[in-house]
Amino acid sequence: MLGRILRDLTLADLTWGGGPLVLAILAFVRAARVEESFDRGAWIACGVIMLAVCAAYLTWVWRRRSDLQSDPGATQR
């Protein structure tokens, strides 16, 4: 199913969805480099939130696009 979702998305969709993914990776790298546990937890929380934003955006775009393709009366701009 994940393969189908990725095939249905365009490069622009993956670019916009990839922004939060890059921020999540940077947050996890930063979390690995800090020494205090509170800071580490905060950076991990930021990374998890960015992963959720990325997944939610890609899922929303995929569902919206499949809804538009299944509706014969819909027009695309």
Image (tube, helix red, strand yellow):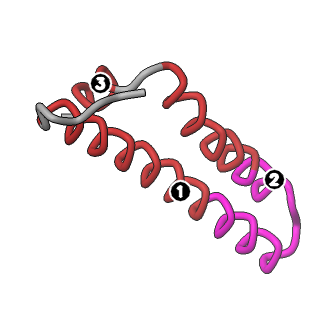
User: What amino acid type is highlighted by mark number 2?
Assistant: Arg
Q: Main secondary structure of the magenta part?
A: helix
Separation (CA) of disc 3 from disc 2: 33 Å
Estimate the spatial distance between the alpha carbons at disc 2 and disc 1, rounded to whole Å: 19 Å
Give residue 39's position: percent from left, percent from top: 82, 73
Which amino acid type is marked by label 3? Asp
Which image quadrant: the N terminus? Answer: top left
Q: Specify few, some or many for label 1: CA neighbours under 10 Å numbering under 14, 14-19, or 20 or more.
A: some
**Closer-to-camera residue (75/70):** 75
To which residue does mark 3 refer? 8
Badge 1 amino acid: Val
Q: Which residues are magenta?
A: 27-47
Q: How many marks?
A: 3
Asked if the magenta segment contains residue 43, the reply would be: yes
Disc 3: CA contacts within 10 A as few (<14), some (14-19) or many (>=20): some
Numbered disc 3: secondary structure: helix
Residue 7 x %, y %: 30, 20
The residue carrying mark 1 is 53
> Could you tell me residue 21's position as x and y percent?
60, 42
Residue at x 84%, y 54% (from the top left corner): 33
Q: Nearer the viewer, mark 3 or mark 1?
A: 3
Q: Position of residue 61 (x, y in %)?
A: 38, 42
Q: Secondary structure at mark 1?
A: helix
Q: Residue at x 79, y 80 (%)?
A: 38
Q: Which residue is mark 2?
A: 30
**57 or 29: which is nearer to us?**
57
